[in-house]
Image (cartoon, rainbow, N blue to C red):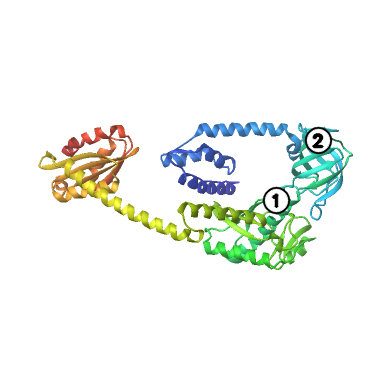
Amino acid sequence: EEESFGKTIDAGLALLDEYIANTKGTVFSGDDAFKLNDTFGFPLDLTKDVLEEKGMTVDEDRFNELLANQKATARAARKDAGADAWKGESVKIKAEKTEFVGYTDFECKAEILALINSDGEQVEMLGTGEKGSVILDKTPFYATSGGQVADTGVIKLDGAEFIVEDTAKNADGVYIHSGVVASGVLSPGNKVTAEIDKNRRLAIMRNHTAAHLLQAALRETLGTHVEQAGQLVNENEVRFDFTHFNAMTDEEIATVENRVNEFILSAQKVEMMEMPIEEAKKMGAMMLFGEKYGDVVRVVKAGDFSTEFCGGTHVSNSGQLGLFKIVSEASVASGVRRITALTGTNVIAYLNKQENTVKAVASALKTSENDVTCRVEALLGESKEKDKEIQNLNAELTKLKSADMFSKPLDIDGLEVYTAKLDGASPDALRTMGDDIKAKSDNAVAVIAGVNSDKASIVAVCGKNAIAKGVKAGDLVRQVAALAGGGGGGRPDSAMAGAKDLSKLDGALSAVEEIVKSLIK
């Protein structure tokens, strides 16, 4: 438990750092804090401690709102027992183990053995509009397992239809088809046709086989330390988590993607076999670490490329995947990476979307699609030239402001003390201004504040004679900034600080005279 908690903390800290990097301002999202707590088990108190060190707070009102919603949902789930009740074994279903025929059949004839209503009670009838669960003697519906989502579809007979929205399996091997009665009445003993959404299942099968090929390609490219750390396979994508301590390079991602596509285009046979576990081990079938297996196991063998223990559904030939495309690779925890990839028609949809984006960009740039890159590079070059021009104009403007604002210094014990506040002056412009003043006289002492939006930067400079008298820029700017709720420091001749409370900035600049006097030895 201690090691598990340590891993949770490591994973949470990594994700928290990513969320903080994407946070604008000093208030951390309550949604992100809740996700860290609810999904990854990262305590709110620890999130607050980390944020406090960075001068940030968390939106606790939003966090508590989401927490309250979660509790309400949990209470509702306990009432809506259709699928949840049997998961918690609070409903004992009087039915034999379901015969699963979904490896080979997308539909089958079956008999209703039992019905469960939305209150978790086993009933003798479900009518139009009622939610509940149907228990059959045999089914083609795959139940959520091993990272593969459940099948959806319909259970129908003359005059009645039940829409299956989810499928699960309990510890006794009974399949529970949850959903709603679209029309008619269902009763135990009814002879029905159970039919899954074929196109959705085919997409899921493509993605599940792709997960096996992806793992083989990763181990071949990155090394045999790569092991599956989790996966989600649905009709839209394959999301595969694996052990690896570095971000993959673009070259590695391309190598893995190309290797999988090579196997797909070779159109090799994908076999699914049941055999004694010892025989499967001799074949070199990969096992999931920590997973428990029975004496007889199911093995999925894709040519000589991949052999794995797996109870999911798969294509029969690699060519049925069509294409394989990796769309993202990222970190999900310390030492765990995640690849999201697409197959089949989802790849075509993705490529079409990318093509439309390029067309839109080309249209906005008034160029052809083939020339988009060249046009963007040209615009970036033009932008840099304009930035340089603006920088030069700002420098000239700064000099003009300097000549006007710093023509009459305050004399303090032979030192020439200047103060000023400029709107819109950047930190670089302030430094240039300060260096110009310092270069004119060894007796110069200057404190210049630049205000940009809701932030202010303060630069202080001191000439050689001023430093000799004990007036150092670092000490000076630190004391001035403190009066405006900020801080900073630097070298004796030049230093910079920030001011948080702009309402106190004028007062801080007015105090420069007294601060200089206090620093003179």
* Circle 1 or circle 2, nearest the eye: 2
Left or right, 217 with reference to 58: right
User: Where residue 220 sits in the image (x, y, percent)?
Assistant: 61, 66
The front one of 417 and 472 is 417
Q: Is residue 494 visible?
A: yes
Label 2: few (<14), some (14–19) or many (≥20) C-alpha neighbours in 10 Å:
some
The residue at 68%/55% (across/down) is 207
The local secondary structure at tag 1 comes to loop
- State the separation of the CA atoms marked 1 and 2: 29 Å
Compared to residue 477, the image places residue 321 above or below, namely: below
Tell me the quarter of the picture where residue 263 sits.
bottom right
Expressed as whole percent of the image width and height from the top left, the position of residue 11 reads 54, 48
In the rendered view, does 479 fall on the left or right side of 175? left
Residue 275 tag number: none
Q: Residue at x 82, y 50 (%)?
A: 107
- Is 266 on the left or on the right of 174, as rendered? left
Q: Position of residue 37 (x, y in %)?
A: 56, 40
Circles 1, 2 touching at the beta carbon (< 8 Å): no
Q: Which residue is mark 1?
A: 148
Q: Considering depth in this image, is 12 or 249 the residue closer to the camera? A: 249
Q: Out of 267 and 30, give the one closest to the viewer.
A: 267
The disc at residue 183 is 2
Q: Secondary structure at mark 2?
A: strand
Mark 2: which amino acid? Ser
Position in image of residue 137 (x %, y %): 86, 45
> In the rendered view of the protein, which quadrant contains the C terminus?
top left
| Residue 492 showing in the rendered view | no
N-term mark: 1 or 2: 1
Count neighbours of disc 1 (C-alpha within 10 A) and say few if under 14, some if 14 to 19, many if 20 or more: many
Looking at the rendered structure, the kind of residue marked 1 is Gln
